[in-house]
Image (cartoon, grey):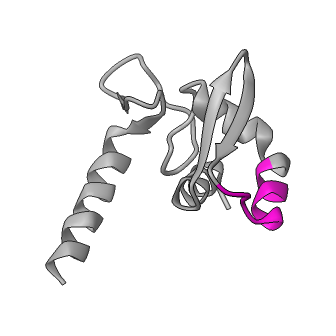
Amino acid sequence: MTGARLLAEARAAGVTVRLEGGKVRLSAAAAPPAELLARLRRHRAELLGLLRREGCQRCGTPVSWRGPGGITFADGTVMHVRCYEEAELARFRAGAR
């Protein structure tokens, strides 16, 4: 599992994952499953890279800023332009079904 997928899973479970003081911080209205917390701890370094805008939130690989390589979102995460387009196409296809 990539950090990007884990981050999406955490958000779907109601867990807010953010960068605070150079550290990954979690918050949630209700206690998240222990198994999810354990996986978040194991992948802390990868999550840190994503939150620092170093990795694509879809594929997890670094985003190059030397050209039109990425899109920055309001939550501070980034995505490759190609990954963004693929995600949007998948979303449209799912909505059409």
Query: Is 43 drawn above or below residue 75 in the view shown?
Result: below
Residue drawn at x 70%, y 32% as measured from the top left:
48
Pick the front one: 68 or 27: 27
**Viewed as shown, does residue 38 lie left or right of 23?**
right
Is 34 drawn above or below residue 7 in the view shown?
Answer: below
Q: Identify which residue is drawn at 32% across, 39% down.
A: 81
Residue at position x 61%, y 55% in the image: 10
On whether residue 64 falls in the magenta region, the answer is no
Residue lying farthest to the bottom in this orientation = 97
7 lies left or right of 37: left
Q: Quarter of the image holding residue 54?
A: top right
Q: Position of residue 52 (x, y in %)?
A: 60, 24
Q: Residue furthest left?
A: 96
Which quarter of the rendered picture does the N terminus lie within? bottom right
Label tally: 0
x and y, in percent, of residue 74 in the image: 38, 29
As for residue 34 lying within the magenta part, the answer is: yes
| Most foreground residue, 45 or 15 | 15
Find residue 18 and report its horizontal and vertical position in percent: 62, 32
Q: Residue at x 48, y 50 (%)?
A: 58
Q: Which residues are magenta?
A: 30-40
Q: Quadrant of residue 14?
A: bottom right
Query: Mostly what secondary structure, the magenta segment?
Result: helix
Q: Is residue 84 found left or right of 6 in the rendered image?
A: left
Nearer to us in this view, 2 or 44? 44
Q: Quadrant of the C terminus?
A: bottom left
